[in-house]
Image: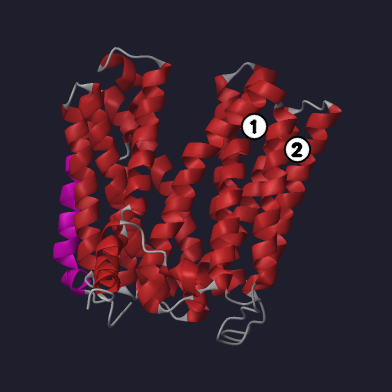
């Protein structure tokens, strides 16, 4: 009895640990997923380094903040255009080959940056072109990679896998720029670009080891032989007729368009907290840190079955935290509310992604993931524009607090209009 008690106690503690920390079951059970997750995590850090290095180099060459801002425009357009097209391609071709080809394209572009830095070429146009092409490669790669997850793991492990993905993205967002700044400061731009190129080999290796991932249905649809406009239109029509899937996008737009105060952080840092650029950096980092903690302590998410209701509550929590951030004038309290908003965003993302993977037939997953990229890319930029406009017309406080309240009201109205979304059950996923 005394010999088995410790084992029994350890077994009893395992569910408790899973309720607190991220569930690592997908990493333990699927070698393919484990390699894919590790390769993606490493490459995200490298991409974060390159993103900062390119911004620093553009400013070093031009001395213009406007020129730095154009980097975002150069990436935004390819993300929108190739996001939709890449999703259609992912529903017609072998997703493994598509992911491998697009990852190889990103790798080659990283080598171009290395070669230009070594040769001393300082052309802003070249940097803009590389950024645009990298965004296109990402927009093609992401739907293919996301569509693979539901084929590599059972449905009950999808929430855990999406929580692990959130850790990947937030780690890259936090650590990548910091490492990039250190490398540029110590050894120059070529060091950051070289490390980024090396990290891409992990993603390439993970893609190489995957099995073939052909979509379930034949290539031709509606009499067409390829992923043309009809394929994209079919995906949009499919989304329009599925209220639960449509709600995953509408609720995210409530948060990202109505309550996205990122553009106001430089103004808020000075006007509310009497700070400077370092204060702005803290405001930018707080939601990412909250999102990272939300992923690390996500073990309890796997026990939730009402995914639609969880999304509604998470988006409402985001809006509430943003509204409270707009009311406080103490920095530590403001950072706390931003971190809580980031944590709520992770919860929403986990369940929205899980619904897109579990409730969508395999032949449509790529196109729906393509729409997801467009929403993720476009929503925050519309939010930046709206927050800046309201701030100029009224005040930053009205823009932030009013946006948070508008988010809560909008998601509540959506929940009342499509009540079936709150009843969505992970055991019986219906689009």
**Gap in angstroms between the C-alphas marked 2 and 1:** 9 Å
**Residue that badge 2 annotates:** 113
Query: Which of the 4 quarters of the picture holds residue 11?
Result: bottom left
Magenta residues, start to end: 405-423
Residue visible at 35% across and 57% down?
Answer: 349
> What residue is pinned by disc 1?
54
Please check the rendered image and state whether residue 188 is part of the magenta-colored stretch, yes or no.
no
* View extreme (front): residue: 2
Q: Which residue is drawn at 43% across and 65% down?
A: 161
Residue neighbourhood size for the residue with mark 2, other residues' Cα within 10 Å, grouped as few (<14), some (14–19), many (≥20): many
Image x and y of residue 42, in percent? 59, 50
Q: Where is residue 209 in the image (x, y as percent from the top left)?
A: 68, 71
Q: Quadrant of residue 177?
A: top right
The reply to whether residue 239 is visible in this rendering is no
Residue 271, picture quadrant: top left
Say which residue appears at 74% left-offset and 46% top-offset. 109
Residue 178 image offset from top left, x and y in percent: 53, 31
- Above or below, comparing residue 328 to residue 357 in the picture: above
Element at badge 1? helix
Answer with mark 2 or mark 1, whichever residue precedes in sequence: 1
Q: In screen coordinates, is 104 left or right of 341?
A: right
Dominant secondary structure, magenta = helix
Q: In this view, does 257 lie above or below 391?
A: below
x and y percentages locating residue 210 in the rendered image:
64, 73
Residue at the image point whose x is 60% and y is 57% from the top: 39
Q: Which quadrant does the N terminus fall into?
A: bottom left
Q: Which of 95 and 296 is in front in this view?
A: 296
Badges 2 and 1: C-beta atoms under 8 Å apart?
A: yes
Residue 40 in view (yes/no): yes
Numbered label tally? 2
Relative side of 380 to 414, left or right: right
Q: Which residue lies furthest to the top in this view?
A: 274
């Amino acid at each position: 009895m005394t010999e088995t008690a410790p084992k029994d106690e350890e077994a009893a503690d395992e569910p408790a640990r899973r309720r607190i920390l991220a569930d690592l079951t997908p990493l333990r059970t699927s070698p393919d997923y484990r390699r894919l997750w590790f390769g993606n995590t490493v490459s995200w850090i490298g991409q974060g380094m390159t993103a900062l290095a390119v911004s620093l180099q553009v400013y070093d060459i031009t001395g213009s903040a406007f020129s730095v801002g154009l980097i975002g425009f150069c990436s935004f357009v390819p993300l929108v255009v190739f996001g939709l097209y890449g999703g259609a391609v992912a529903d017609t071709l072998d997703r493994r080959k598509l992911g491998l080809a697009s990852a190889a394209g990103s790798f080659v572009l990283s080598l171009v940056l290395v070669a230009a830095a070594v040769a001393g070429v300082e052309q802003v146009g070249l940097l803009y072109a590389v950024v645009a092409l990298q965004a296109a490669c990402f927009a093609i790669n992401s739907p293919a990679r996301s569509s693979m997850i539901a084929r590599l793991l059972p449905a009950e492990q999808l929430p855990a896998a999406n929580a692990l993905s959130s850790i990947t993205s937030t780690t890259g967002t936090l650590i990548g720029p910091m490492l990039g700044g250190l490398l540029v400061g110590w050894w120059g731009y070529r060091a950051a670009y070289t490390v980024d190129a090396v990290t891409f080999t992990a993603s390439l290796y993970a893609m190489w080891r995957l099995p073939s991932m052909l979509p379930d249905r034949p290539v031709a649809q509606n009499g067409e032989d390829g992923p043309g406009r009809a394929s994209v239109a079919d995906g949009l029509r499919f989304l329009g007729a599925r209220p639960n899937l449509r709600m995953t996008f509408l609720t995210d737009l409530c948060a990202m368009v109505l309550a996205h105060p990122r553009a106001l952080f430089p103004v808020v840092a000075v006007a509310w907290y009497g700070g400077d650029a370092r204060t702005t950096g803290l405001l930018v980092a707080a939601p990412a840190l909250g999102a990272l903690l939300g992923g690390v302590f996500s073990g309890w998410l796997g026990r939730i079955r009402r995914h639609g209701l969880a999304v509604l509550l998470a988006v409402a929590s985001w809006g509430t935290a943003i509204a409270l951030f707009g009311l406080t004038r103490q920095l530590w309290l403001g950072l706390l509310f931003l971190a809580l908003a980031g944590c709520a965003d992770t919860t929403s993302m986990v369940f929205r992604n899980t619904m897109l993977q579990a409730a969508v037939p395999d032949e449509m997953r790529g196109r729906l993931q393509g729409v997801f990229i467009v929403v993720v890319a476009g929503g925050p930029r519309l939010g930046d524009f709206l927050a800046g406009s309201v701030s100029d017309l009224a005040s930053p406080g009205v823009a932030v607090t009013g946006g948070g309240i508008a988010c809560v009201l909008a998601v509540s109205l959506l929940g009342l209009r499509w009540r079936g979304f709150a009843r969505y059950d992970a055991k019986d996923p219906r689009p």
